[in-house]
Image (cartoon, coloured by chain):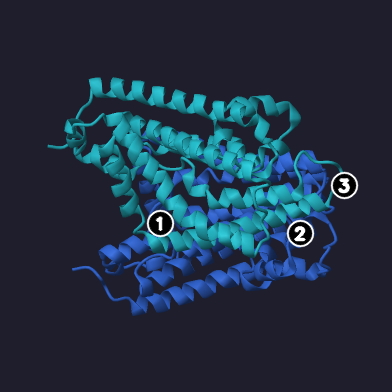
Chain colours: A cyan, B blue
């Protein structure tokens, strides 16, 4: 356990070095958030009909999305890719740790460090300048926190699965892009999930992707009441487990016939 | 001039052949891009399904503007990949190789790489535009058809101009400024909706500052025969795309100044 924690923290510290990239990302996401807020405000001002989610809730949902964007499984670990390309993966195989847990630990910091760097300043900006609302209650805040941790774990499990596919494809770009497309559409990043047509709700709710965005944000807003917390958390946990099992199986298969490149 | 075009075509053919060597990876990337861009368009449909109208605009009018903007950007993006990679070329000193060849630097960079997956951006734009055009009951006079072409050309020129300017900055900073992506990608995101839905300061920025809305929104109104809620006259809507072409010419001038200032970093 101690060795995995060391992996998480070492990687975390090295990722915190990229500060100028973080600043650029911050500006981009603030502008992006403002554009999206204005678009939704325009849509909400065009109707008097009751909507499944209030306009102000949607704004907060958008800002949360911008703040935690970097936690989504949107890319693969490029360091691992160069290891696979160069043959350095051989060293990974002889480490005295479980390879899957090691990769999952890497993915956890890979998803968390850039996110923390962006989330804090962005949330401060959204609260102070854009009038984003705080969690509806302390209970909602606590539920949001737990569910957000689950979201990061889910994202890391998906990332690790994508990393494992690189053992076959070497580049991994194609799989990652397709997955990220699905994530954008079905997590709530493009449009908050409650606004999708009513007939599509059961399908969207069954998929794993809402656990990355929609579940924690709606807990924050109180749009999913705290009384339903156990159910939605269970949905996240089941999918985390599914991706971990799939990742482990795929890795075991790949390692049975691994070809180390280079030499 | 003709000779330049010939070389440009050769550059592109080589680049396409190189990409087709990795077919599976290429197809998956194409699929991924399609899902993402189709998802963005689907978002517009989902929102119109919920809200019926966007301050007076219907879904076809928005899809029409969306189509023009996305086609313009796709064309610009596919033609300027070389400029995207330019920051790295400055860092490694590879740009020196380009300088010693007897062709213009801008032409060589434009022909550097035509990434097929960038072309996938074209699909949703074309689909949206066609779908909108079929439902809008447009009057396809010669003037309108040519205005559509000119509008796409103006939009593509403006986006290309922005990308060239972004690359030009690398002459001084030796790295491309990620922040400029906010202007290009943010510009697409913004101007694919009618510009009058935004707050005045923001709208003015994309009308006068970086005139992305000017080259797409105003001509689109003229083609659809919709009076502008912002009250611009018809003649202005017809000449608006010219601003994009002027912008590109200006950017290429700045690029030339940059090339003259270039000090190699290579060893």
How far, Cα to Cα, is label 3 from label 1? Answer: 52 Å
Side of A107 relative to A194 (left or right):
left
Query: Which residue is pictured at 57% across the width and 61% down the height?
Result: A124
Q: Nearer the viewer, mark 2 or mark 1?
A: 2
Identify whether B261 is placed above or below B76: below
Which quadrant of the figure contains the N terminus of chain A? top left
Marks 2 and 1 close (CB-CB < 8 Å): no
Q: Which residue is mark 2?
A: B197
Q: x, y (%) of residue A240?
A: 47, 28
Q: Return the x and y of residue A241 as percentages of the image width and height.
A: 45, 25
Instruction: Tell me: A142 left or right of A19.
Output: right
Q: Is residue B42 left or right of residue B133?
A: left
Residue B111, numbered circle: 1
Residue A119 x/y as whole percent: 51, 54
Subunit that carries the residue with mark 1: B
Which residue has dot 3 on it?
A48
Q: Report helix, strand or loop for mark 3.
A: loop
Q: Which quadrant of the figure has residue B203?
A: bottom right
Q: Quadrant of residue B185?
A: bottom right
Q: Residue furthest right?
A: A48
Q: Can see residue A166? A: yes
Q: Residue at x 39, y 31 (%)?
A: A161
Disc 3: which chain?
A
């Amino acid at each position: 356990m101690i060795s995995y924690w060391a992996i998480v923290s070492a990687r975390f510290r090295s990722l915190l070095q990229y500060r100028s990239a973080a600043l650029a990302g911050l500006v981009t996401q603030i502008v992006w958030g403002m554009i999206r807020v204005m678009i939704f405000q325009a849509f909400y001002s065009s109707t008097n009909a009751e909507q499944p989610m209030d306009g102000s809730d949607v704004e907060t949902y958008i800002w949360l999305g911008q703040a935690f964007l970097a936690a989504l499984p949107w890319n693969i670990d490029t360091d691992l890719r160069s290891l696979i390309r160069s043959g350095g993966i051989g060293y990974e195989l002889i480490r005295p740790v479980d390879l899957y847990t090691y990769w999952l630990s890497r993915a956890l910091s890979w998803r968390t460090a850039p996110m923390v760097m962006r989330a804090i300043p962005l949330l401060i900006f959204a609260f102070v300048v854009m009038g984003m609302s705080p969690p509806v209650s302390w209970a909602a805040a606590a539920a949001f926190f737990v569910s957000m941790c689950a979201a990061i774990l889910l994202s890391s499990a998906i990332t690790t699965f994508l990393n494992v596919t690189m053992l076959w494809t070497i580049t991994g770009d194609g799989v990652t892009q397709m997955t990220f497309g699905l994530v954008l559409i079905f997590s709530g990043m493009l449009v908050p999930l409650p606004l999708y047509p009513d007939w599509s709700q059961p399908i969207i709710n069954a998929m794993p992707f809402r656990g990355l965005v929609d579940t924690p944000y709606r807990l924050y807003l109180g749009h999913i009441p705290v009384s339903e917390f156990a159910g939605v958390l269970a949905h996240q946990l089941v999918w985390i487990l599914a991706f971990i099992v799939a990742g482990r199986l795929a890795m075991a298969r790949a390692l049975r016939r691994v070809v180390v490149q280079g030499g | 001039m003709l000779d330049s075009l010939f070389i440009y075509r050769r550059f592109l053919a080589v680049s396409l052949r190189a990409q087709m060597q990795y077919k599976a990876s290429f197809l998956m990337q194409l699929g991924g891009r399609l899902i993402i861009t189709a998802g963005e368009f689907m978002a517009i449909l989902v929102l119109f399904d919920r809200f019926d109208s966007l301050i007076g605009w219907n879904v076809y009018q928005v899809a029409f503007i969306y189509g023009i903007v996305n086609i313009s950007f796709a064309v610009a993006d596919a033609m300027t990949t070389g400029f995207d990679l330019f920051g790295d070329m400055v860092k490694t000193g590879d740009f020196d190789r380009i300088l010693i060849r007897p062709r213009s630097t801008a032409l060589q960079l434009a022909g550097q790489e035509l990434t097929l997956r960038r072309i996938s951006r074209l699909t949703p734009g074309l689909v949206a535009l066609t779908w909108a055009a079929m439902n809008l009951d447009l009057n396809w006079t010669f003037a309108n058809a040519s205005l559509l072409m000119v509008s796409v050309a103006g939009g593509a020129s403006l986006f290309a101009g922005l990308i060239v300017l972004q690359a030009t900055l690398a002459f001084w900073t030796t790295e491309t400024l990620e922040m400029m992506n906010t202007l290009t990608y943010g510009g697409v995101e913004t101007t694919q909706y009618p510009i009058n839905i935004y707050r005045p300061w923001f709208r003015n920025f994309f009308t006068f500052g970086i005139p992305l809305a000017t080259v797409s929104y105003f001509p689109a109104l003229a083609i659809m025969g919709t009076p502008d809620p912002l009250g611009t006259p018809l003649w202005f809507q017809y000449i608006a795309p010219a601003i994009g072409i002027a912008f590109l010419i200006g950017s290429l001038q700045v690029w030339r100044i940059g090339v003259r200032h270039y000090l190699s970093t290579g060893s």
